Image: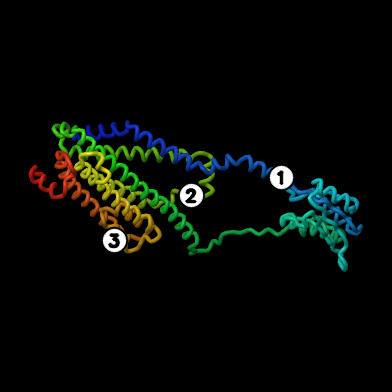
Amino acid sequence: MNKLGTIIGFTYKQKAKTKAFKVTTLILVILMTIGINLPYLISSFTGEEKENSSATRAEVPSIGLVITDPEQQAVGDELKLYTDGLINPVFKLVSYESAEESKLGEDVNDGIIDGYVTLENMEGSASPLATYYSLDGDVSSEVATWLQLAIQNAKTKVIAQNSLTEQQIADISTPVSLITKEMNVENSSSTADTEDSASQGVNYAFVYVLMILFFFSTVMTGNMIASEITAEKSSRIMEILITSVSPLTQMFGKIIGIFLLSLTQIGIFGLTIFANLMLPHNKEMLSSMNIDLTLLNLDVLFYGLLFYIFGYFLYAVLFAAIGSIVSRTEDLGQALTPMTMLSLAAFYIGIFSMGTPNSLLVQISSYVPFTAPTVMILRVGMGEIAVWQIWVSLVILIAAILGFGWLSAKIYRTGVLMYGKRPSVAELRKAMKAFKM
């Protein structure tokens, strides 16, 4: 046990000090930081344009007011009082004493006003006829709507000023407010459905992240384990190590050491994500998105981590076995191709089945040891599954780890002593019998 701990510590420290590990971790941390803060960075770079657009919006258009009929003077006066009293006006009115078109046209061309509106008598009615003039003969819908409301308000005050009080006139002019509220009906499932939908969204994101994490960590650490063993074997250091430490202790020491290194890297990534999300601008973004991590299903978290750990060890023992039968690091990539394809299959089945978590393919794959780590996470998080099915899959996975672990240990003990070209299955079996493995 002491030798196992020594190998675990040595493997962990040796790999953690390598330039490749440090550079890879640093690059990924920088990419995560940039990715999380990208919306804020974009808004910062375009901040000047936003300020300019805000300033432009703050400069409301000026509209000339021309009273062509004296009978509409009272409406014009009320209209001017109303618009001047607005806190956030959409436009401002500039009164003109005469309707001299040359003067009005000159002011429009000079940018003093954007256009002008005339008030004249409407035939057969006391209501004013308002006409808006501009260079292009058009007006924005916002200005048109507010101008109509303002004229309507002024007209109402003029007509009702002798028969209604100021309060009654104010009440008539005040628009009706429409308030929306959620129905509070007993036995209503709307609230529950909303919570289920939000919980499903959080679970979906967590399952997606776990599957990506499992695939990349399995491939990266698996290659690291195999390359470590192959490098020691090709440099003949293995012949020295095998005299002091048993091959089985070496294999599991390297697997556990690199697993702890992988957890360290994942921890660094987790702290990076957490630190960036806690920045003020990102906290505001999260609050606006209404993301509530308390809605995460604890079963997804528990079983997800359980299948992640056991799935890692299943792939790790096989990567170690393959690394032990390769004598040159140049041949390692080709030898690891089947394992890479197997991990890709597990990843793709999980990712492309997220929309159909209860399909027959998913159900069958959840009991296959090589695909169970990703597919079972999907079924727990997104599908409908009984607890006994989860534990059956877990038992099969553990049995596969023990079985392949025993086989990998025998291959490892034999493979580390074989040099030259990569041995075939028949040659391995013959060597195992010769070494009585």
- What colour scheme governs how the chains and residues are painted in the rendered image of this protein? rainbow
Which of the two discs, 1 and 3, labels the residue nearer the N terminus?
1
Badge number at residue 364: 3
Which of the two discs, 1 and 2, labels the residue nearer the N terminus?
1
Looking at the rendered image, the quarter that the C terminus falls into is top left
Q: Position of residue 182 (x, y in %)?
A: 56, 59
Foreground mark, 1 or 2, reads: 1
Q: Give the CA distance from mark 1 to mark 2.
A: 34 Å
- Say few, some or many: other residues with alpha carbon within 10 Å of mark 2 (under 14 / 14 to 19 / 20 or more): some
Looking at the rendered image, the quarter that the N terminus falls into is top left
Q: Position of residue 310 (x, y in %)?
A: 27, 48
Q: Determine the residue positioned at 74% across, 49% down.
A: 89
What residue would you read off at disc 1? 58
> Are the residues at dot 1 and dot 3 in contact (C-beta closer than 8 Å)?
no
- Disc 2 marks a residue whose amino acid type is Ile
Q: Is residue 104 left or right of residue 286?
A: right
Q: Determine the residue positioned at 70% across, 45% down.
A: 56
Which of the two discs, 2 and 3, labels the residue nearer the N terminus?
2
Badge number at residue 291: 2
